[in-house]
Amino acid sequence: MKKIAIIIPTKNRLESFISFAESWKATTEGESDVIVGIDIGDSTYDSILSKYPFTFEYVTPKPFLHILNELALKYSNTYEYIGFMEDDCAFVSPQWESTFISKLDSLGNNGIVWGNDLINRDYIVGLPFLNSSIVKRLGFMAPPCIECLWADHFWKAIVDKFNSGHYFNDIVIEHKHYSTGKTLKDNVSNEIERIGHNDALRYSSYRVNGLNKDLEKLV
């Protein structure tokens, strides 16, 4: 069976993570596995480790997009598809797995699909589900120069370059970002905000000096 490896880095957000985990349990068709990236030494999740059928990977503390790259590259060898979830997101619609896999099967090696996050919708690709071949050919899932932000624009660049994406407006995968009022702004959000300016500068430089070279690797 073709399955999706869902990579979800998480840090000091037990309540939000439980919301994600319960949403996966409520909607899974058995066509995805969840890989959780946790900092070594973070005991936040100890009480729920045996509650969910997830793989918990303890990693050297690093920015969450770097954790995504580390785990996506590792699991791209055993899963045909890789998905990325943030720990303040939740699955809402049913049958997202089979729908995503069916569409990815038709899109080819550069296929990327995403659902409606109720914030950015089709403007950018905030929560991508993509062909793992992309990760293997690039050697990463998000450009290594960025730490927390702007990867969504990179995934949209792949979609635009190869006309290889599909947005499902009717499949809701809600992003409960603090700006929506559905979660509180926490220390993790403050840290992401702090480094956001640097990520913007890094991605701007990458877009000029590295993006097209990396896209050529996917031709």
Image (cartoon, rainbow, N blue to C red):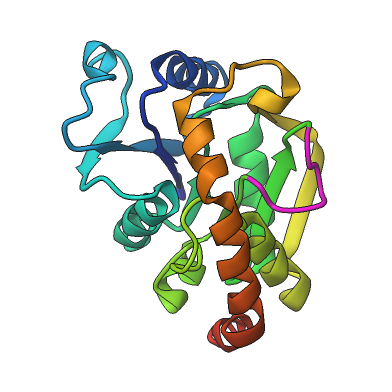
Position of 30 relative to 70 (above/below): above
Range covered by the magenta-colored residues: 119-126
Q: Nearer the viewer, residue 106 or 155?
A: 155
Q: Is residue 96 left or right of residue 25?
A: right
Query: x and y percent of residue 210 in the render?
Result: 56, 83
Query: x and y percent of residue 30 in the render?
Result: 46, 31
At x 67%, y 15%, the residue is: 182
At x 80%, y 42%, the residue is: 121
Position of 134 relative to 192 (above/below): below
Q: Nearer the viewer, residue 10 or 206?
A: 206
Q: Is residue 56 left or right of residue 189?
A: left
Query: x and y percent of residue 162 in the render?
Result: 73, 76
Position of 187 relative to 74 (above/below): above
121 drawn magenta: yes
At x 27%, y 35%, the residue is: 55
Query: x and y percent of residue 126 in the render?
Result: 66, 47
Q: Is residue 1 left or right of residue 115?
A: left
8 drawn magenta: no
In the rendered view of the protein, which quadrant contains the C terminus? bottom right
| Residue at the left extreme of this rendering | 41
Q: Nearer the viewer, residue 143 or 219?
A: 143
Position of 132 relative to 59 (above/below): below
Q: Residue 91 sits in which quadrant?
A: top right
Q: Nearer the viewer, residue 130 or 139?
A: 139
Q: Residue 165 sits in which quadrant?
A: bottom right
The answer, for residue 176, to whether it is visible in the render is no
Q: Main secondary structure of the magenta part?
A: loop
The answer, for residue 167, to whether it is visible in the render is yes
Circle count? 0
